[in-house]
Amino acid sequence: MNTRVLTGITTSGTPHLGNYVGAIRPAIQASQQNNVDAFFFLADYHALIKSEDPALIARSRLEIAATWLASGLDPKRVTFYRQSDVPEIPELCWMLTCVTAKGLMNRAHAYKASVDQNTAKGVEADDGINMGLFSYPILMAADILMFNAHKVPVGRDQTQHLEMARDIAQRFNHLFGQGHEFFVLPEAVISEDVATLPGLDGRKMSKSYGNTVPLFEGGAKALNSAIAKIVTDSRGPGEPKDADASHLYLIYKAFAQPSETANFHAELSAGMGWGDAKKRLCERIEQEMGRLRAHDEDWMAHPDRIEEILQEGARKARAIATPFIHELRQAVGLRSLATSRTASSSQPNKKEKASGKSARYVTFRDEAGQFRFRLLAQDGAELLSSIAFADPKQAGAAMRALQQAGAQACLKLEGTLGLLIVQGEQVIAKAPDSASTEQREQLIATLTVAMPPSDAA
Ligand code: TRP
């Protein structure tokens, strides 16, 4: 299986250099590797926590989407979507909320920082804090666990959230998995050299500090005037500078090749003036960003194209999320009443299975002499029908693999009404087309109950 890499950017501001260097650029590089499945998204539900300005959120969604695309994200390779287009995410968030200890959230840095500020101001501890801010790590866990991401590239300030996501995943697995691990435990990826870019004032560049250098907005002019505001020490031209302690140098390093960086370092040590250093920094950033800015302007002028790409991304994301949330609904007990056998037993009971009273497989040879199998419901209705195999051993092996893995692991949505059964990349069977999406959801539920993974049964 490929490594799943997932990351999101909160759409509550204009993309800045820190987003580009710390998140967008490394994520796009990772997505270009062969053994990686990348999931990049606009964290627009997260944006509601911090902003009550609809126009700002709408604008930011467009700008951040355009930035990803202008920076080279290939929507054919990457599943690129908006969080708010995947309703399974908030549904999962609620399931996770119900297994998360409140005490865990009390310890979240972002929440504690707000409480500390309130205490320092002498107001009530929770003054101005909404429940979104308080439980935001759970929404972030849902973002990650929904797609069972292995690796999550984030800034260092997010490591605690990844630990919390692992905690929550483990708890859910333990409570409902009966030995089956629903969720992969995700790992944070923090690249040492690009971890955090200093902002104008030297603190981490972040929209929450208002110390950012805009990436594209305002063009080269805005870039130059922001860089002019970066704080430096008071050493004049000709005086040796401490390059390593300089924010300018750290930003330069994030854009330049090692040899250029070494040069810049040497010239600062030899007394290059801060004014000249800023000019050099602007030129170097412009060399990389000028080209991308032209793409960005093009995307910003065509929001309809971006919308189309995001809709397609949501479709791809939901092809994974819909069957998975069904599986999780089954696990927590939110099951279709039509498929429940007895009020007291959750799994199809072993006796029933052994006597073949629930769904059963039948194998047969078709007119062309090829080997096939079907899964039939208790009432004889066809639940799925396999492709033709030349060799009966192959047909048998595919059927056994399916019994082992269970239906949920193999389901893949096709169009709006179709349902495929896949093993790896290969389609091995098809369910009859449903008449409506509701009917398809019902079918998924039926298959989930009829074909549990064999180790969980
Ligand atoms: N909280 C992240 C930030 O502020 C953004 C984010 C939301 C995210 N959901 C995520 C990042 C899931 C990685 C994975 O930077």
Image: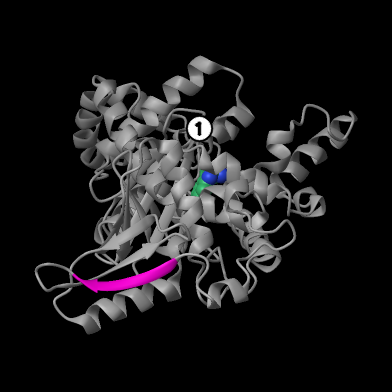
Image quarter of the N terminus: bottom left
User: In the displayed structure, would residue 324 be above or below residue 296?
Assistant: below
Q: Which residues are magenta?
A: 360-365
Q: Main secondary structure of the magenta part?
A: strand
Residue 125 visible here: yes
Q: Position of residue 195 (x, y in %)?
A: 47, 55
- Which residue is painted at 52% across and 29% down in the image? 12
Q: Position of residue 348 (x, y in %)?
A: 60, 66
Image quarter of the C terminus: bottom right
What kind of residue is marked 1? Asp
Task: Determine the residue located farthest toward the bottom in the rendered image.
Answer: 393
Q: Position of residue 27 (x, y in %)?
A: 36, 52
Mark 1, Cα crowd under 10 Å, few <14 / some 14-19 / many 20+, is many
| Residue linked to disc 1 | 44
User: In the displayed structure, would residue 423 be above or below residue 239?
Assistant: below
Q: Position of residue 434 (x, y in %)?
A: 35, 42
Q: Is residue 362 magenta?
A: yes
- Which residue is painted at 27% across and 41% down in the image? 71
Task: Determine the residue located farthest toward the left in the rendered image.
Answer: 368
**Is 21 on the left or on the right of 336, as rendered?**
left
Q: Is residue 141 magenta?
A: no
